């Protein structure tokens, strides 16, 4: 039996390594056709030896780690476009993932999308690329996977509302003044999910939930006033879909990305897998739901406003957030500096046009420069 070839872009990260565990259990259906990483050449070499892909790429400029590998940024699109690749799992962090998402969709591939930044920056371009090239976008994010599973092929005219759950992050119960004193280590100590550093900080500010609202808007074609967010500290309910008759479906499970990764590979089918342990409702109870504390976590409303504004505003939001988080991760700014920096970039550049890839990339660059000027 032939197996489907998967390109894992960002194979050395949290999602990338989880994806390789999933594929190792599903070798009768999938094989690894391509792997790319950025800086972790040692882990990439181990992965290449274990999975024997036909293409290996290291994106970091100027690093030649292995003569058989491909080097530089262009390895991301090269891997996504290969003929032996059926599914591109985009697990790169940040705006740098956009071109590979577009390339995979334009070549008619399934893009299993963890790199939500792609869709936030270039939502209309990404959806157009899928239409033009015949590619298929399937979410990896647990919330969007949950929504896809709840909708289960029903027409979108039957959907009244999407409700995304948010863990609330490590600072869920802190006051605005407590937030003045939190450290990087505090922000990286997520209560329920083990993830890369950038998304972990985004979960603490709730910028991640803003990215996910914009992602849901483009993926499911639902207007912003029919997408809500509720805080759910246990991360067991991954999201809700409310239908027009008032019925509400939720998808549940332990916080483990291996299930949404597997579903993005096999969708719309389900396959047997022993990687996710049996669900125990008693052990998970009680489940709590709370409103978002908008005043303490302003990044959520800033991102949703950028989504509503359209044009390049979501790209400005995304780039300003990436730049501010990078500075926070370097220890150059405090946690409470992140949202005002995003606000500043949106006030200056939020009306930039966003009709083409060049326009989006120009807005992204302007927003990054703006945040550097505001915070240095
Ligand atoms: N982690 C989760 O549970 C989770 C859940 C939902 C969605 N997501 C989304 O999935 C994406 C990946 O998240 P993650 O937590 O897996 O991040 P991560 O652990 O930081 O991994 C990021 C991956 O991207 C590579 N990379 C970094 N910069 C790059 C560049 N400039 N060019 C090419 N590759 C680059 C890294 O390579 P090196 O390691 O070799 O430097 C690594 O393989 C993000 O968009 C995130 O929002 C993650």
Image (spheres, rainbow, N blue to C red):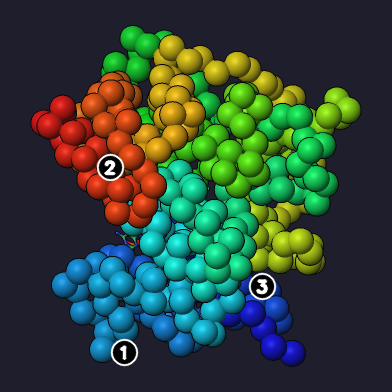
Using the image, tell me which numbered label, if any, was put on residue 363: 2
Question: Viewed as shown, does residue 367 lie left or right of 22?
Answer: left
Residue at the location (57% across, 72% down)? 108
The answer to whether residue 99 is left or right of residue 224 is left
Q: How many marks?
A: 3
* Image position, residue 291 (x, y; %): 60, 16
Left or right of 132? Residue 152 is: right
Q: Counting other residues with Cα less than 10 Å from the Cα at mark 3, is it few (<14), some (14-19), or many (20 or more)?
A: some
Front residue of 264 and 102: 102
What residue lies at 52% left-to-right and 84% top-to-bottom? 83
Q: Can residue 41 be seen here? A: no
Q: Secondary structure at mark 2?
A: helix
Instruction: Give the secondary structure at mark 1.
Output: loop
Q: Quadrant of the N terminus?
A: bottom right
The answer to whether residue 252 shows anywhere in this view is yes
Q: Quadrant of ligand 1?
A: bottom left
Q: Residue 171: image x %, image y %?
A: 44, 23
Q: Badge 1: how crowded within 10 Å, few (<14), some, or many (20+)? A: few
Residue 22 spot, x, y in % from top left: 62, 67
Q: CA distance from mark 1 to mark 2?
A: 36 Å
Q: Do the residues bearing badges 1 and 2 touch, measured as CB atoms within 8 Å? A: no
Q: Which residue is mark 1?
A: 68
Callout 2 crowding tier (Cα within 10 Å): few <14, some 14–19, many ≥20: many
Question: Which quadrant would residue 161 be assigned to in this image?
Answer: top right
Left/right of residue 164 with respect to residue 171 in the rendered view: right
> For the residue with label 1, is its CB less than 8 Å from the closest atom of ligand 1?
no
Q: Horizontal and vertical percent for residue 308?
A: 49, 29
Q: Are marks 2 and 3 in contact (CB under 8 Å)?
A: no
Work out how far the residue at label 2 is from the one at label 3, CA to CA, in angstroms: 42 Å
Q: Residue at x 71, y 48 (%)?
A: 148
Q: Quadrant of the C terminus?
A: top left
């Amino acid at each position: 039996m032939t197996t489907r070839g998967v390109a894992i872009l960002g194979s050395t990260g949290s999602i990338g390594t989880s994806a390789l565990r999933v594929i190792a259990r599903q070798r009768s259906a999938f094989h690894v056709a391509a792997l790319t990483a950025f800086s972790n050449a040692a882990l990439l070499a181990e992965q290449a030896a274990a999975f024997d892909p036909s293409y290996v790429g290291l994106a970091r400029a100027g690093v030649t780690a292995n003569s058989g590998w491909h080097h530089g940024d262009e390895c991301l699109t090269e891997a996504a476009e290969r003929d032996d690749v059926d599914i591109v799992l985009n697990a790169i962090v940040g705006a740098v993932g956009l071109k590979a998402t577009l390339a995979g969709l334009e070549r008619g591939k399934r893009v299993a999308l963890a790199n939500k930044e792609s869709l936030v920056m270039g939502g209309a371009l990404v959806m157009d690329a899928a239409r033009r090239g015949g590619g298929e976008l399937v979410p990896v994010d647990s919330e969007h996977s949950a929504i896809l599973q709840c909708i289960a092929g029903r027409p979108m005219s039957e959907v009244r509302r999407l409700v995304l759950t948010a863990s609330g992050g490590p600072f869920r119960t802190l006051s605005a003044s407590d937030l003045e004193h939190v450290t990087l280590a505090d922000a990286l100590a997520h209560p329920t999910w083990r993830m890369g550093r950038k998304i972990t900080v985004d979960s603490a500010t709730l910028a991640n939930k803003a990215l996910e609202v914009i992602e849901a808007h483009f993926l499911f074609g639902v207007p912003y006033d029919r997408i809500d967010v509720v805080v759910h500290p246990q991360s067991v309910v991954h999201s809700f879909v409310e239908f027009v008759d008032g019925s509400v479906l939720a998808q549940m499970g332990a916080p483990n990305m291996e299930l949404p990764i597997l579903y993005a590979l096999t969708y719309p089918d389900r396959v047997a897998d022993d990687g996710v342990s049996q669900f125990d409702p008693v052990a998970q109870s009680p489940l709590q739901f709370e409103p978002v504390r908008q005043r303490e976590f302003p990044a959520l409303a800033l991102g949703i406003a950028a989504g509503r504004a359209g044009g390049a505003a979501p790209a400005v939001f995304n780039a300003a957030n990436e730049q501010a988080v990078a500075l926070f991760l370097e220890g150059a700014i405090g946690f409470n500096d992140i949202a005002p920096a995003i606000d500043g970039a949106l006030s200056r550049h939020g009306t930039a046009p966003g009709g083409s890839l060049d326009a989006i990339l120009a807005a992204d660059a302007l927003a990054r420069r703006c945040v550097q000027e505001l915070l240095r």
